[in-house]
Image (tube, rainbow, N blue to C red):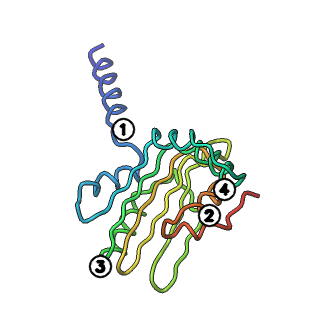
Amino acid sequence: MKRFLLLLVAVFASFHLFAQQGSAIERFFQKYENDRSFTVITITPKMFSMFAKLDPGDADAKNMMKVIQKLKGLRILTKETTKDGPRLYREAAAFIGGDFEELMTVRDKGSDVKFMVKEDAKGNINELVMLVGGSDQFLAMSLVGNMDLNEISQIANGVSIQGMDKLKNVKKK
């Protein structure tokens, strides 16, 4: 009986520790969010709900608002004018576990861009992670919500975040 109680306590303790850790990319953000050499941008679900209350005039803006209503959070961690861009890119990519599937990778002479997605059982995207690493820059972005590829393409068209332009032509089949 004593062993059973000890085992039960150990199992609950491990669940508690696992819950505190969060997703892999979340742990990467936590590692650097207090480092003042990084710029950190966080948009909370509350802010997205405020956007959803706006009444846009044209049809394109209304469609964009429908997509925004599905978003639950956006986090960006960036470091400009750094020589650590490639190292940070590799480190962030190593944090991302098997829960994510690679959507697209773009490599050119100056930088690497990687898009990873986490899907639910129905094929909806719960999280999009973008990593950009270059010889003088680094950016990690996590977009959380309930979206599909068409909606991600709409978001890419509507924002001016470095690297997101690579997703403008991604469409759901």
| Mark closer to the observer (1, 4) | 4
Q: Amino acid at mark 3?
A: Lys
Give the residue furthest to the bottom. Answer: 109
Sequence-first tag of 1 and 3: 1
Label 4: which residue?
A: 149
| Mark closer to the observer (4, 2) | 2
Q: For the point 44% across and 57% down, which residue is it?
A: 96
Sequence-first tag of 4 and 3: 3
Q: Amino acid at mark 4?
A: Leu
Q: For the point 34% across and 22% down, which residue is it?
A: 8
Mark 4 neighbour class, 10 Å CA radius: few under 14, some 14 to 19, many 20 or more: some
- 105 with respect to 86 (left or right): right
Answer yes or no: do the residues labelled 4 and 3 have beta carbons within 8 Å? Answer: no
Sequence-first tag of 2 and 1: 1
Q: For the point 59% across and 60% down, which residue is it?
A: 158
Which one is in front, 140 or 164? 164
Question: Vertical placement of 34 versus 108: above or below?
Answer: above
Label 3: which residue?
A: 83
* Residue 157 disc label: 2
Sequence-first tag of 1 and 4: 1
Q: Amino acid at mark 1?
A: Phe
Residue 169 in the image: state x and y as whole percent: 68, 67
Which one is in front, 166 or 86? 166
Dot 2: element: helix
Label 1: which residue?
A: 18
Q: Quadrant of the N terminus?
A: top left
Q: CA distance from mark 1 to mark 4?
A: 30 Å
Dot 3: element: loop
Q: CA distance from mark 1 to mark 3?
A: 34 Å
Answer yes or no: do the residues labelled 3 and 2 have beta carbons within 8 Å? Answer: no
Residue 83, by quadrant, is bottom left
- 121 with respect to 111 (left or right): right
